[in-house]
């Protein structure tokens, strides 16, 4: 199926590993030029080179920290000068937390607030004028099932991801008249490096291996009984970016293997 994305330009944050990398690869296979950003300069540039080599489509990697306003301003200004604008924004940068509310200080709360919510706010404000000039665009915010069904060990993650869902709905209503579609995706269990980090930390406390911890999480929570690969989730991102999803506006989609235990 031709998704009608050829020659579009996309910016993907947190694009050097995990879900962000898989989304960038999926978009590139559809002929989308991609800009991926991450904090590790060596890794993000290598990832972009690999995407371009595999797809034959232009891909550039840029070092940027999404918790820093100056990095966001520099990134979007560079994208405007280098590409003339953007058609797609994937706000994906994020990481799990692991704390108790009574133990976490304000600095930790602020860091995750900036990373999960304010990065999406700031980037959206910056790129929407580009999209208006180009006749429209797509913004997808990567949240989490934890925005609706929280995990007990990461309350800061739960709260900030829930805020991202509400932001997505509010922004969608504000810019739909500009032919800009905003949606949110709440993934369930996706086997990313961050999940492996969590499994290592929490498995060690229980005296079990990371793989044993991950297997138990999947069996206990997801009716499908396994983690998704980043590529499985990326396919849905790519579809939502395309004109094939032209009536999808202001929604939050759960891609969770049946994990969510309520009707939404």
Image: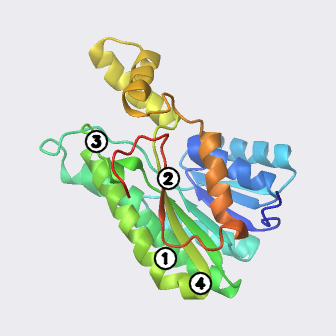
Task: Identify the disc placed on residue 1.
Answer: none
Closer mark to the observer between disc 3 and disc 2: 3
The residue singled out by tag 4 in the image is: 129
Categorize mark 4 by other alpha carbons within 10 Å: few (<14), some (14-19), many (20+): some
Establish if 242 lies above or below 132: above
In 3D space, how far apart are the residues under numbered discs 3 and 2 (Cα atoms)? 17 Å
Looking at the rendered structure, the secondary structure element under dot 2 is loop
The residue singled out by tag 3 in the image is: 154
**Nearer-N-terminus badge (1/2):** 2
In 3D space, how far apart are the residues under numbered discs 1 and 4 (Cα atoms)? 15 Å
Which residue corresponds to the image point at 37% horizontal and 60% vertical from the top-left?
Answer: 114
**Nearer-N-terminus badge (1/3):** 3
Q: Are marks 3 and 2 in contact (CB under 8 Å)?
A: no
Q: Position of residue 80 (x, y in %)?
A: 68, 75
Closer mark to the observer between disc 1 and disc 2: 1
The residue singled out by tag 1 in the image is: 172
Q: Position of residue 206 (x, y in %)?
A: 28, 15
């Amino acid at each position: 199926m031709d998704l009608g994305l050829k020659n579009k330009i996309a910016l993907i944050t947190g694009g050097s590993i995990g879900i962000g990398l898989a989304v960038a690869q999926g978009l590139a296979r559809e002929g989308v030029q991609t800009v991926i950003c991450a904090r590790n300069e060596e890794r993000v540039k290598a990832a972009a080179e690999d995407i371009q080599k595999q797809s034959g489509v232009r891909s550039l990697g840029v070092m940027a920290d999404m918790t820093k306003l100056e990095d966001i301003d520099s990134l979007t200004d560079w994208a405007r000068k280098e590409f003339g604008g953007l058609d797609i924004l994937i706000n994906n940068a994020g990481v799990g937390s692991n704390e108790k509310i009574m133990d976490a200080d304000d600095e930790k709360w602020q860091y995750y607030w900036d990373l999960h919510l304010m990065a999406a706010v700031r980037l959206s404000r910056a790129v929407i004028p580009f999209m208006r000039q180009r006749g429209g665009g797509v913004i997808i915010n990567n949240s989490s099932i934890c925005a609706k069904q929280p995990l007990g060990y990461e309350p800061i993650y739960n709260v900030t991801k829930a805020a991202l869902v509400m932001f997505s709905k509010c922004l969608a209503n504000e810019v739909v008249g500009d032919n800009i579609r905003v949606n949110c995706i709440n993934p369930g269990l996706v086997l990313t490096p961050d999940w492996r980090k969590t499994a290592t930390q929490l498995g060690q406390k229980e005296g079990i291996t990371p793989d044993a911890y991950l297997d138990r999480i999947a069996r206990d929570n997801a009716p499908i009984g396994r983690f998704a690969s980043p590529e499985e989730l990326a396919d849905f991102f790519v579809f939502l970016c395309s004109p094939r999803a032209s009536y999808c506006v202001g929604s939050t989609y759960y891609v969770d293997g049946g994990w969510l235990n309520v009707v939404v």
